[in-house]
Structure formats: structure tokens, C-alpha cells
């Protein structure tokens, strides 16, 4: 299996899995990522965790069809419960879920001791990036790399975090937009800002009749943060 068989999104996720890692891919989407990395000699071994029977069978079929069952274990389990101590996992990938769900998976796994060895986390939240960054910051995971890309008119953010005893605090802007996302792909970052602004304006419009003043203030502030980022980017473009 070559990188051409991976989606653009998964191929970029694969770039952040260290050479020689022992990988756990949670919610593995047919075990495509693990199959590619094992076949390419990029990882030593992999575990694919699936929480439902259908995806479990699909991932199992992929691994067996490619003759990789000796190197890839497919397990039916909830979140990081798929990981066993004997796996010696050094990198965990969780991609294609909401940030809130990824946080729940990480928090539950942490309580089970699945993060005790400080594995690298390669995360690709579809939404809820700020909540995920906040969890990482408060749980000794420092964001070291981010990337934003567009595929099939959808925009994805990838967050890479490594365990650290000392993690610098992120500003509000860094929590919402990412400390490295903009620099990774300014054009796509700019495009997402406008999508976010349109979404925020729609929410603020719908909240005009709401009696929940706290919620109104929160989304108004969120829109202002986006508008300020757009202003900064447009100034930078003008200066270029």
C-alpha cells in the first residue's frame, strides 16, 4: 500500500508518525493508515482500535487482505482501552472525530494509565480544536506542530503534541486558532477564517432574541476574535 492510496488528510497525518514508532490508531477507518505505515516500514507494529463491530470487521478485513496480521492487531474496544501495556505504544493517532470526543477518549485513557509513557499524540479534530488544545495544555502535552489543509472542499487541522513536564501557556488566540496553524498553510488558514466568520455571524444573528446573555457575549467575543485575525492577515497580505 502506497501513500497514493491514502487520502490527502491521512497522508499528512502519516507524516507526523515517527520512524520506527509503535502505533495505536483509534477509530482507524479501515486500518488504512496503519497498513500503509507498516507496509512502508515506517512503524514497527500497530494496534487499530474500533468501538463498533462494523468498523472492527472492516479494519480486520483490510489487515488480513494485505497480509499484515503479524504486525497489526485490530481490537474491538472503547478508545484507548484498545491499548495493552505489552504493545509499548509510542504514538497514538486519533483522526476524523470532534475535538470534544477526542478529549473524552484521551481523558478516559489517561485515567486508565494509557498515557503513562508519554506517547506522541497526532490528532485531527473535525471541530472543537480549542477544547482539545486546552486539554493538551493542562495535561502536560505541548503542541509542537500543526498543519491545516483542504481536501474535497473540507478543511482539516492536524495537531501534534508531545509530553512535557513544562508546557507554556497558550494565549486565547492560540487556543482558538492554533499556535502554528496559520504558518503551516496561510492560504487555507485564511479561507477557514472566513468560513468561521460566516458561521459566527449566523449564530450571533440567531441569538439576538435569546435571553441567555452569557452565551450572546461569548459568541460576540468569538466573532471579534475572528475579525481581528482577518484584519491582521489582510494587513500582512497588503505589506507583501
Image: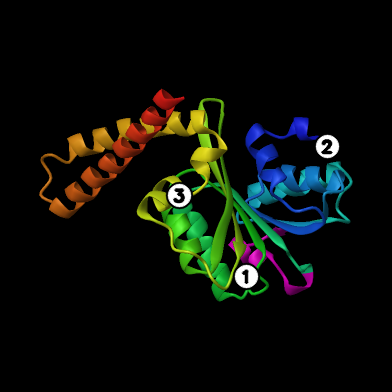
C-alpha distance separating marks 2 and 1 = 30 Å
Quarter location, residue 190: top left
**x, y percent for residue 56:** 68, 51
C-alpha distance separating marks 2 and 3 = 31 Å
Judging by the rendered image, the residue that carries numbered circle 1 is: 115
Q: Residue at x 70, y 59 (%)?
A: 91
* Tag 2 near tag 1, CB within 8 Å: no
Label placed on residue 91: none
- Foreground residue, 105 or 116? 116
Label placed on residue 129: 3
In primary-sequence order, the first of circles 2 and 1 is 2
Q: Secondary structure at mark 3?
A: helix
Question: What kind of colouring is applied to the model shown?
Answer: rainbow
Few, some or many C-alpha atoms within 10 Å of disc 1 (few <14, some 14-19, many ≥20)? many
Name the front one of labels 2 and 1. 1
Above/below status of 111 relative to 73: below
- Foreground residue, 176 or 129? 176
For the magenta stretch, what is the residue range?
75-86
Q: Secondary structure at mark 1?
A: loop
Label placed on residue 1: 2
Looking at the figure, which quarter contains the N terminus?
Answer: top right
Above/below status of 117 relative to 173: below
Few, some or many C-alpha atoms within 10 Å of disc 3 (few <14, some 14-19, many ≥20)? many
**x, y percent for residue 70:** 89, 56
Q: Is residue 233 among what the camera can see? A: yes
In primary-sequence order, the first of circles 2 and 3 is 2
Q: Secondary structure at mark 2?
A: loop
Amino acid at each position: 500500500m502506497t501513500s497514493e492510496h491514502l487520502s490527502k488528510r491521512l497522508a499528512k497525518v502519516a507524516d507526523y508518525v515517527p520512524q520506527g514508532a509503535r502505533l495505536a490508531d483509534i477509530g482507524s477507518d479501515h486500518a488504512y493508515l496503519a497498513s500503509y505505515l507498516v507496509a512502508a516500514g515506517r512503524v514497527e507494529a500497530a494496534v487499530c482500535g474500533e468501538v463498533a463491530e462494523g468498523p472492527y470487521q472492516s479494519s480486520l478485513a483490510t489487515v488480513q487482505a494485505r497480509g499484515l496480521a503479524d504486525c497489526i492487531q485490530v481490537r474491538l474496544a472503547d478508545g484507548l482501552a484498545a491499548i495493552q501495556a505489552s504493545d509499548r505504544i509510542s504514538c497514538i493517532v486519533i483522526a476524523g472525530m470532534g475535538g470534544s470526543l477526542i478529549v473524552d477518549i484521551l481523558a478516559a485513557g489517561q485515567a486508565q494509565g494509557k498515557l503513562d509513557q508519554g506517547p506522541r499524540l497526532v490528532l485531527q479534530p473535525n471541530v472543537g480544536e480549542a477544547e482539545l488544545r486546552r486539554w493538551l495544555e493542562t495535561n502536560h502535552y505541548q503542541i509542537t506542530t500543526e498543519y491545516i489543509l483542504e481536501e474535497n472542499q473540507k478543511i482539516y487541522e492536524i495537531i501534534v503534541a508531545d509530553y512535557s513536564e513544562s508546557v507554556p501557556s497558550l494565549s486565547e488566540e492560540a487556543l482558538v486558532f492554533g499556535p502554528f496553524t496559520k504558518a503551516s498553510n496561510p492560504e487555507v488558514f485564511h479561507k477557514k477564517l472566513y468560513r468561521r466568520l460566516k458561521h459566527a455571524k449566523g449564530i450571533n444573528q440567531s441569538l439576538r432574541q435569546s435571553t441567555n446573555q452569557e452565551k450572546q457575549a461569548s459568541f460576540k467575543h468569538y466573532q471579534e476574535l475572528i475579525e481581528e485575525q482577518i484584519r491582521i492577515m489582510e494587513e500582512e497580505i497588503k505589506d507583501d
